[in-house]
Amino acid sequence: MKVLWVDLISELGGAQRSLLEVCSALNVPPVEVAAAVPHGPLFDRLTERGITVFPVSAVRARRSGWGLFTTAARLLRSPASVSQIIRAFKPDLIHANSLPALLALGHTPERQPVFWHVRDLKFPTLVGRDAARKAARIIAASEAIDETLAEVLSPRLLGRVRVVRNGIDAARFVPADPAAARAAFGLPPAGPVLGMVAHLIPWKRHDAFIRMAGIILKQRPDATFAIVGRDLFKEHARWVGQLKSLAESCGLGDRLRWFGEVDAAEAILPAFDLLVHPALGEPFGRVVCEAQACGLPVIAADSGGPATIIEHDVTGLLAHAGEPAAFAALALELLADRPRAARLAEAGRRRVLEQYTTRHVCEQLAQEYRTALAAARATDDEDDSDKERSRNRYSDE
């Protein structure tokens, strides 16, 4: 089975990291995986892992002002168009890692199964409905995304939707020595450390984390706060400046540490006592699973994907409406009740290993691939039989 994955972004966001891990795990005989992605970090990582990679032009789809209709024009200027790649690689199945990637496929060979991996809660409805018609399977990366698709797609298309939750590499994200992690990143050896790991994008709500930190610091002056992430696409310089000003106005000073993107999140996560994830409308929440796998208690906004990953007060805590005061109250509770924090962390890690690993993703996708290919072959066989019956009928006449 030959599978071609397509993505038009090469910076390592959550969707691209998922592609990297899944493609690496799937690329084992009898499955041969190739990828069509732009030059950049994802291209290089795939190549390092022995995946055949074809270059295409990058097309950035923003959460506002998507500009998806420029995709085809930009691809004409690519080193090799997606259609040329399809002809060269001759995949049995094509897996588009985003809506822009699906649009970039253009006309694919008849009855060649195409998968659309939906990783966003927001996309242009009319464009999505039209594009979904070409997909044999529509893969929802979380239950929250599945609910969104149920609102916008027709009942006929909903029959093609399968929920395949994102997963993390359970071999990488494991509990580790907090003292060593703190020393490696220059964090204080004593006192609680609360962290947030997310690219510097407004909807991730770093401002809520900073306001929460200001509230907590009044009761726990020994606390330190860490923000890990960067302006991935260099689109939010003004926003980053506003965050720095907010931190200053909240009196955080050196109690707030700023880290650029840490390539291996598993290295810094063990340095934290808590992970806080205040994003509203998060499609999945990959870092929630990563932190839980590392043995951390997690507090997230009661919204989107994290609300389906976390069972409140069982595998983590959910802050109502994602308010800074609500986060602060819950965080102070856990810092004061270490046995409860440990119970949540243990239950969260167990849930992640049971349901949210790359192995689970690959098993589900492989089954869907086999089913889709079998259906396509059955249709071909049926058409061949119809043609044979037609020839016999004319011959008899």
Image: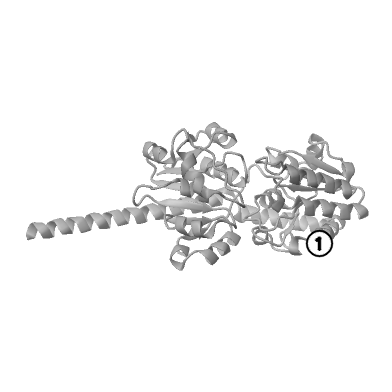
Is residue 267 toward the left or the right of residue 362 in the image? right
Give the percent coordinates (x, y) of residue 363: 50, 51
Q: Secondary structure at mark 1?
A: helix
The quarter in which the N terminus is drawn is top left
Image quarter of residue 164: bottom right
Could you tell me if residue 228 is visible in this image? no
User: Which residue is located at x 57 percent, y 64 percent?
Assistant: 147
Q: Amino acid at mark 1?
A: Ala
Furthest residue toward left: 397
Q: How is the image coloured?
A: one colour
- Occupied quadrant, residue 325: bottom right
**Image x and y of residue 369, in percent:** 43, 51
Percent coordinates x, y for residue 361 in the rendering:
54, 51
The quarter holding residue 300 reads: bottom right
From the viewer's side, name the closer residue of 51 and 160.
160
Q: Residue at point 21% right, 58% down?
A: 386
Question: Image height check: is 343 above or below 191?
Answer: below
Count of numbered tags? 1
Q: Which residue is mark 1?
A: 326
**Residue nearer the viewer, 37 or 245:** 245
Q: Say which quadrant the C terminus sits in.
A: bottom left
Note whether residue 213 is visible.
yes
Coordinates of residue 244 in the picture (x, y in percent): 82, 44
Q: Is residue 8 left or right of residue 263?
A: left
In the image, taking residue 29 as reference, residue 141 lies left or right, namely right
> Around disc 1, counting alpha carbons within 10 Å, would you say few (fewer than 14), some (14 to 19), or many (20 or more)?
some
